[in-house]
Structure formats: structure tokens, C-alpha cells
Amino acid sequence: MPANLPPEYFKAEQRYLQAKTIKERIEATQEMIRIAPKHKGTEKLLKVLKRRLAKLRKELEERERSRPRGGRGTGFAIKKEGCAQVAIVGLPNSGKSTLLRMLTSARPEVASYPFTTRVPVPGMMEYEDVQIQLIEIPAVVEGSSLGKGLGTQPLSVARNADAIALVIDASSDPQPQLRTLVEELEAMGVRLNRDPPKVSVQKRQEGGIDVIGANLIEGGEEEIKRVLRERRIHNALVTVEGRISIEDLEEVLDGSLVYRHSFVILTKCDSAEGEPERLGPFPVIRAIGPIEELKRKIFENLELIRVYTKRPNEKPSERPLVLRKGSTILHVARAIHRDFELKLRSARVWGSAQFPGQRVPRDYVLRDGDVVELHL
């Protein structure tokens, strides 16, 4: 389907090309998004424009952040603490503040009017022997990525978090809420519950463009070379390790995308029954029932495990190492010290092993609560 772009679009595009400042480029890109027709023929164009806008806004925010503040009040940057930082993202009045008060000692204001929270509010959630930092960010609305509501700063906080909890009001239709949150995060270059494309592009000084695995990408080697040359990349080694699209390659070259684990928390639930276990690719947690059970579900959905190390003939450590689910003995050694990874001879495991203290290989996959004894 043709795009059928009006003359005003090309005028805005010309302003973008002639812009001398980041703010001018942002304004021109916003105008192009506003003017472009919204139909199937412009889907790819709008994605490119929104991705460009997100990149420009991020660049502007980084510049403004680096300037002296001169006592300008509270900023949006939150230092990471605990074993993980989780951004609580939702529409106005979706129950974000109530959820944060329920799970932490933070006391954000709770009110029935929109945008009660105007700056990020952090709180530490204690779950057994670990702490997880939760950050309620100001409400997201349709168009936040274009500057509506409180603008892009709240989305930038979510972008920098380790994981994102999408807060959905169960008393209303969850699908439109979820769609708005995902679309606004996508426009800011945040991809949820998706793996990065399995392609790498190594720029070099000479040698032209070489492609390994060209059969795994639509259009093959010629299409790959065309995309790279459009971006003035004439010497590079491209390695494709999984089936991807040309749009995936363009996103990798864009360099402004981040990939974050995410899950849904349903608030204002009447009961723990009758709600879906998943909404699309997102696991669902219901904010109902015992608080400790809710904390447990959040920890499990972060896909983390706790591993306790011990020396021979001694008790396990009280404080665990917190690692990604799927971590192995080798990851434990690496987390303790770089030399341990090189010198590791064997290991014993209590917990998930078939019998206590079983000797296991370096690639043994650990589970939450395992005790590990390393031998160098």
C-alpha cells in the first residue's frame, strides 16, 4: 500500500534536514509523525520516525543532565540499589502508588486525580534475604513518547531499569491499557520480553562488507549491503546467527534499543480467580492476597536465583549471590572473582543436585536456593 504522503510532510522533512539543533530536529520529527497518514502503508515509516524521535529525546536528556543544575530540584535519575531495579509503569490512577505503599516503606501520595505522582518514587521491597528496588514512575498516557502528559522523562526511567512491571487496572478492559503502555515504551526504544536480534556488525577500516549467514536474513547479502551503505558503512563484518528481518538489522544499526524483561501486575482485583495467567507475552500477577506471596511472585518473575556459597566444612554464607535464572557454576565463580573462573577445578552442590554435596561440572545449571562449594 503506498504511503501517499501530503506536501506538508515533505516540508517538515526539509525542516528536519536543515535543523541545526536537537530541539529543532525533535520538533520537525514530531510534525512528520503528526502529519503522516495512519494506515498500513505508513506503519514502517512511523516506526522509523518514532525510533528517531526517541533517540533524539534521549540525546537531549543526556545533554541536559550533564549541565550544571544550579539547584533545580529533583531529577528523574534514580541510582540503582538492591539486587534489581524494577520500574512500575501504568496509566493514570491504575494503582501504582497503592502498590508501592503495599510492598515497600515508601509513602507516595495516593489520590483519585491523574498525575498525583510527578517525579519517580523509589522504595525497597524486602523479600526474604534480598532487597529489590521498586520505582513508581509518573503516569504514562497515549502520546507520552511525543511529549504529552509529563513527557518522555518517566519513560526514560523505565528504559534504564532492569525490569518493568506493567500495572493494569483490572476493573477496566486490560487490553487497551496494555497496548498503550507497550506502544509508548516501544516508541522510546524499549523492547519487552524479546531477545535482541542474533546479528552483530563489526565496523572496520577496510575490506568491504563481508556477511556470514546471509541466508538467514530476508533479501540476502545484497539487501544487507544496501542497508549498510545507506548508513555510510562500507567496511564491516556482519554475522547473522538466527533468522531475522531487515527491520531487525536496522534496529541493531540504530543502536538506541534496549531489551527488558517485563510482567503485568493486575490491581483492583475482586478475587484471585477468573483472570488470565498471561496477557500476550506477559506473565500476570494479581495484586491480591498475602503480601509475602505477592513479593514471591514478583521475585520469581524477575527470573533471578539466589545462590549461597560455602567453604569446606563451614556453614553457607548468609547473604546470597543473586544471578540470572539459567546461571551455572561458572557464573558463580565469575561473580566471586575473575581468578576463580580460571582456576576452578570442581564444585559441589546442595539443593537441586540428586544428593547433598554432589560433585557437578562447570556448566551445571543452578536453581534458586542452591548452596555451592567451589574447589580451586
Image (cartoon, grey):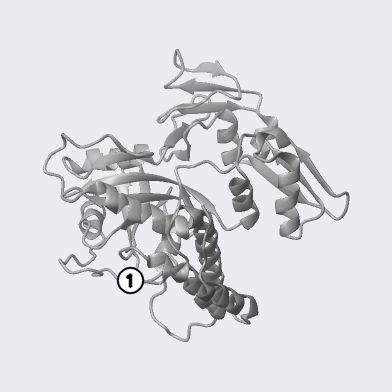
Q: Which of these two is toward me, 125 or 63?
A: 63
Q: Residue furthest bottom?
A: 70
Q: Give the residue at x 50% y 54%.
A: 41
Q: Give the residue at x 30% y 38%.
A: 297
| Circle 1 residue | 149
Q: Give the residue at x 22% y 68%.
A: 114
Q: Which of these two is toward me, 262 or 181?
A: 181
- For the C terminus, the quadrant is top right
Residue 240 screen position, x and y as percent: 69, 38
Callout 1: 10 Å neighbours few (<14), some, many (20+)? some
Left or right relative to 130: residue 4:
right
Residue 173 screen position, x and y as percent: 21, 49
Location of residue 43 with respect to 244 vertically, above or below? below
Location of residue 36 with respect to 348 vertically, above or below? below
Residue 66 appears in view: no
Identify the amino acid type marked 1.
Gly
User: In the picture, residue 112 is in which quadrant?
Assistant: bottom left
Residue 61 screen position, x and y as percent: 51, 72
* SS at circle 1: loop
